[in-house]
Structures are given as C-alpha cells and as structure tokens.
Amino acid sequence: MRRGLAWLVAVPLMLAGSQVAHVLAYRIVYPEASVRLRDLVATGHGYMSMLPIALGVAAAVVVLSLMASALDAARGSDVRSLPPWAFALLPAAGFAFQEYIERWLAWGFFPWNAAEEPTFVLGIALQLPFGALAYLAARLLLRTAKRLGRRLAQVSPPRPRVAAPLRLVREAQMLPPLPSLLSRSLGRRGPPLLSG
C-alpha cells in the first residue's frame, strides 16, 4: 500500500482527536457556558460552528482512503505501518500552532503569551491520550482494510453459468443411403458407356 494512503487515514483521525481534546480542555477550564463562550470568542474560536463540516470532510477522506487501501491490498500490495511518534508529536504541535494562529488572527498581533493561558497546558496534555486513540483507530482501520482487500482477492468473480445446450432433436439413427433416382435402372453409378 502506498504510505500516502495510510497518512490520509491517520491525519484526519489525528485532527478529529485534537479538536475533541481542544473542546474538552475549554470545557474543563471554563465549566460555565457563558464564561467559556466569552473566552472562545475573545480568543478567535468563532470558527467552531464550522467544525462539523470539517469533521464530515475528514470522515469522507478516511473512508475513501480505506477503500483505496483495500483495493491495494487486493492487488497484493503490503500495508505499511505508521510511526507511533507521529501520533504523539503531531497533535500536540498542531494544537499549539492552532492556539497561536487563533489568537494572532483575532487580536491582530502575535500572541507571545498564549502558552500562559490556562487552556494551553491542559490542551497539550489532552493531545497525548487522544493521539493514542487516533493511532489505535488508524491501525485497526488499516488492518481491517487490508483483510478485506485480501478476502476480495481470494474470491474469484462469479462466472456466468453456461447451460448445456438442450437437445431438442434426437440424434438421428444412421440409415443406409438412399439410391439415386438416376441410377435405379443402371445399378451402378459412373460415366456413360462409350460405344465403339
């Protein structure tokens, strides 16, 4: 299997896990909804209403990648594994990058102190278990796609059954040949006799 397909399965799962951890961090730090909403708007999280659409697109990418992975496995390609370090490092780095970019776009200047926010450290800490869950989910899905592809390769396509031709006419019995109408009186066939 191409490694790109494995990453197309892994990255959306990592992003989904990162966003769930992101939301959970804000819910833990700001349990009261009005305070949480005020902080989310002030720190540039107004785009969160678009999150279901982004997650739907990510799910579609995962499904299409798994289908392509199963077809690759059916052709005999080997499934390549994903590095576990990526699931520990990339979600945490993505969360930190996202926090800085959100504030930069909302405030208009680079937020040097974003790491001092109460949600930052908790959000980074929550990325590790959600990254581990994404890793397990990606491995399970890729392994399932591989097994499905191998089974598809083993099952030969159904052949159309060709029915034996029906014998509507009985085989004719061998009859002796009929004598020719012209040769009845001569008894033998052949060229005419020459008189000489």
Image (tube, helix red, strand yellow):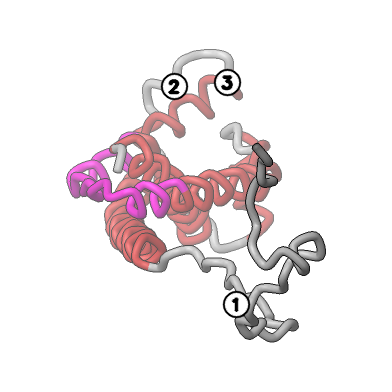
Q: Nearer the viewer, residue 23 or 1?
A: 1
87 is within the stretch colored magenta: yes
Identify the residue under disc 2: 111
Q: Amino acid at mark 2?
A: Pro
Question: Where is residue 62 shown, x and y percent of the image?
Answer: 49, 49
In-front residue for pair 77/192: 192
Is residue 130 left or right of 171 when viewed as pictured? left
Which SS class for mark 1? loop
List x then y, in percent, for residue 181: 81, 65
Find residue 98 and name its label.
Answer: none
Range of magenta residues: 68-93
Question: Does residue 47 appear anywhere in the picture?
Answer: yes
Is 47 in the magenta?
A: no
Residue occupying the point 60% across, 32% down: 44
- Residue at figure coordinates x 48%, y 63% from the top left: 157
The answer to whether the residues at label 3 and label 1 have Cβ atoms under 8 Å apart is: no
What residue sits right under mark 1 in the picture? 164
Residue 178: x %, y % from top left: 72, 73
Q: Is residue 65 above or below residue 98?
A: below
The numbered mark at residue 105 is 3
